Image (tube, grey):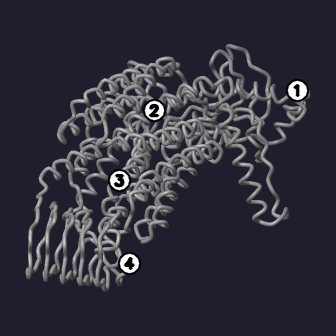
Amino acid sequence: DGYRNTNQVSDDYRYQDGNYDAPNDGYYRGGDEPAQEEDAQSDVTEGHDEDDEVYEGEYQGIPHPDDIKEKQKKRAPAVDDEYRDRADLMAERMEDEEQLAHQYENIIEECGHGRFQWTLFFVLGLALMADGVEVFVVGFVLPSAEKDMCLSSSNKGMLGLIVYLGMMVGAVLLGGLADKLGRKQCLIISLAINAAFAFLSSFVQGYGFFLFCRLISGLGIGGTLPIVFAYFSEFLSREKRGEHLSWLCMFWMIGGIYASAMAWSIIPHYGWGFSMGTKYHFHSWRVFVLVCALPCIASLVALKFMPESPRFLLEIGKHDEAWMILKQVHDTNMRAKGEPERVFTVSYIKTPKQVDEFIEIQSSTGTWYQRWLVRITTTLKQVWDNVLYCLTAQYRMNTLMLAVVWFTMALSYYGLIVWFPDMIRYFQDEAYESRVKIFDEEEVSHFTFNFTLENQIHRNGEYRNDKFIGMKFKEVRFEDSLFEDCYFEDVRSSETFFENCTIISTVFYNTDLYEHKFINCRLINSTFMKEKEGCHIDFEEDNDFLIYLVSFLGSLSVLPGNIISALLMDKIGRIKMIGGSMLISAVCCFFLFFGNSESAMIGWQCLFCGASIAAWNALDVITVELYPTDKRATAFGILNGLCKFGAILGNSIFSSFVGITKVVPILLASSALVGGGLLALRLPETREQVLM
């Protein structure tokens, strides 16, 4: 039998009173037929006589073209689509989509919720876990990388923000492509980019190349969040959607816990690495970067065995592929429930009218790169049209309100989770400085220093014929002191400076006491020989275990909020969940005024993270449900990109007030949360809505 495009079969089945009726000859029909009587019954899936050998639930395929032609002769000639107004075509497509939404909801309910959804849940959870890991990686490696690559303060700040910049671009770009190329294909591209450049970044030595790798790695992982939620939601029925999307959010928490635990167990072990000569060093923090790519790689491999979203396939007119996937979902779940005899009774699914034209470029047209250029520019134009569609009259108000809520939530949340560790470091520095030892007018001569000097200030001292050999200076300052006929050999220093000192006939051999460490000093007949090259790292002293603990506890503290939001999402609704969570988080911010110690800051951080997670989960759910299938990932990508922009601003603004005042960060965060929470209450509730 011949086959023809399934887009031409849409008029065979009439949507009457919420039901789809089909011709009663027992075959799957591609030709157009008159509407049946209201009380007529479709027996597409009914059994027939023994000669026909047609069984209940069996998909009968596409009829012979000769049968189609005979049917078409009986019909009045229809007007070709090319002569119809585009507005009419769009109106017809909108009607088709509404019919498809209700039919698809019934099909997903028939397929049930079981083994297939749980398998996909864990596969997509690994991708979401990779997104959570990416947020923490740079923060954990910075203390080590800054010494390994000799990073300045500005370079450290750029490295901290570059990941968010990449995620912002990736969310918009890859989210838009997912509505054109498919959820599975774009998620594979996203994860592959992240895995490749995360792996590469662990080996590069230069700061510039490392920065570039983390940027592209962030771009790749930025696309996972909008694609994962759009992908998973299209396999869930209305009654399961809110709860199970909230359970999926737990993997972001698991990613934070995984990153914290790996940093704690790997980075301090200096021996977990190797060196090749004097130029190439692979320290343990690079091992940590490699280990953090494992969830992404695992998800990438597992995703190969998952099907494309059937809802997406129906949107682009691929009826047969969608039908086969839905049958696979049904059969997988029924076998797991011990009911393999149950038959998938759906024989035909409504497909929306295809309005967009796709022009296939012949191989003889131009050169290969010209053909690819046309394909790429056409696809990007379609993505841009989707972006603009989210701002049309139908969706403009919802998009703008969601944008404000996403931005205010990101500004306060990401700003505070960076501010908390910075404040803890500030309290640690204050406690450290309070223990400083001060030596005034000391005179030392003919003495050999071969031990560590730490947290000391030496003023108006005189050092004559002294030797400083194989020692370390940590947080040491020499002010208005005299060094005469001294000898420094194999000296390492951290935050050590000489101010207004006079240094006479002194030799510096194989030290890291560089020129910038001598401030307003007079160097007379002094010699610097064989200065140490590169940056030297001491893991035992320079790594802050408390920061790993803070991140670990902050990630773990969202577990109760995740559980509560999952259980109540479909009971109290998305809107109340967002508004209530943001307002409670704003109240938690005011308690930060009482955080005057490390333990207090850790406690308030855990409380804030636990209260705010419900708002994040509800935002993910409502964003998925407010937009139609062909715009869903695009809209999610735009809003998530704006979220990352808010994270960049929050990180920059909040960190600038550390050690200056707590008032501005606390008031800014609480004001943003209150404003966003009140605005969220004006959004439409979507828990009773089918997925359009």
Q: Which amino acid type corresponds to the residue marked 1 in the rendered image? A: Arg
Label 1 to label 3: alpha-carbon separation: 68 Å
Q: Residue at x 40, y 59 (%)?
A: 293
Q: Mark 3: which secondary structure?
A: helix
Label 4 to label 3: alpha-carbon separation: 23 Å
**Residue count near mark 4 (Cα–Cα under 10 Å), binned few <14, some 14–19, many ≥20:** few
Q: Which mark is residue 139?
A: 3
Label 1 to label 4: alpha-carbon separation: 77 Å
Q: First in sequence, mark 1 or 2: give its number.
A: 1
Tell me the residue that label 1 is attached to. Answer: 75
Q: First in sequence, mark 2 or 4: give its number.
A: 2
**Residue count near mark 3 (Cα–Cα under 10 Å), binned few <14, some 14–19, many ≥20:** some
Q: Which amino acid type corresponds to the residue marked 4 in the rendered image? A: Tyr
Percent x, y of residue 199: 43, 65
Q: Which mark is residue 318?
A: none
Q: First in sequence, mark 2 or 3: give its number.
A: 2
Q: Mark 2: which secondary structure?
A: loop
Mark 2, mark 4: which one is toward the viewer?
A: 4
Q: Which amino acid type corresponds to the residue marked 3 in the rendered image? A: Gly
**Residue count near mark 2 (Cα–Cα under 10 Å), binned few <14, some 14–19, many ≥20:** many
